[in-house]
Amino acid sequence: MTALATPPAAAPTPAPLLKVAGLTTRFETGQGTVTAVDDVGFEVMPGEILGLVGESGSGKSVTLRSLTRLIHAPGKVSGTVEWQGRDILALPERQIRQVRGGEIAMIFQEPMAALNPVLTVGLQIGENLKAHTGLDRQQRLARAVELLDMVGIPAAASRLGDYPHEFSGGMRQRVM
């Protein structure tokens, strides 16, 4: 008697969460066209973390601003950017605002430039939560404390009323 065994099927390869292909960003200036990002492509798979590293002026921030549609005239972005199978460059403005900050975020090296110096850290975290969650005011406050605790901010509840300049540079990065 002969028994035939069927080998187990290979697990399907997961699709990339983020797929960028041919990303190019140009700015029209009085001296002509400046290409800030030229034919960038990469994929980020589930569980992966991507860090862009390069010299000052190499296009890291422009790349990230391009893929989150934060480049405005006179800038022009071309290529394809797919987030979880959706074409980000074609999403209506309302939908891209939900993706930006809610699903995709950037952490800048100098967060003092990203945090509003005249608003408390708690208010800024709360505004983000209001824009991207259905939490009420009390729930947002509790979640803000939880988030600060998660990133190792000591005495998180009492720090919500502090301003960005009252945090160290590393703490400001964690707030972001």
Image (cartoon, grey):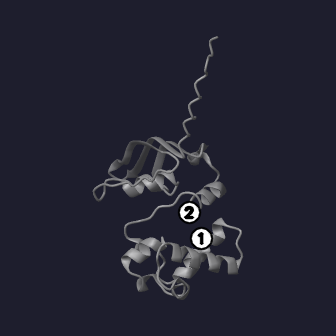
Q: At 45% across and 55% down in the image, what residue appears? A: 64
**Label 2 crowd (10 A; few <14 / some 14-19 / many >=20):** some
Q: At 61% across and 60% down in the image, what residue appears? A: 97
Taking the image as shown, residue 140 lies to the left or right of residue 148, namely: right
Taking the image as shown, residue 49 lies to the left or right of residue 95, namely: left
Query: In the displayed structure, would residue 87 be above or below residue 173?
Result: above
Which residue is identified by label 2?
Answer: 101
Question: Which mark sits nearer the N-terminus, 2 or 1?
Answer: 2
Residue 9 shows in the view: yes
Depth check: give the residue in front, 28 or 107.
107
Real-space Cα distance between discs 2 and 1?
Answer: 7 Å
Element type at marker 1? helix
Q: Amino acid at mark 1?
A: Asn
Which residue is identified by label 1?
Answer: 128
Residue 91, image x and y in percent?
62, 49
Name the outermost residue toward the left: 55
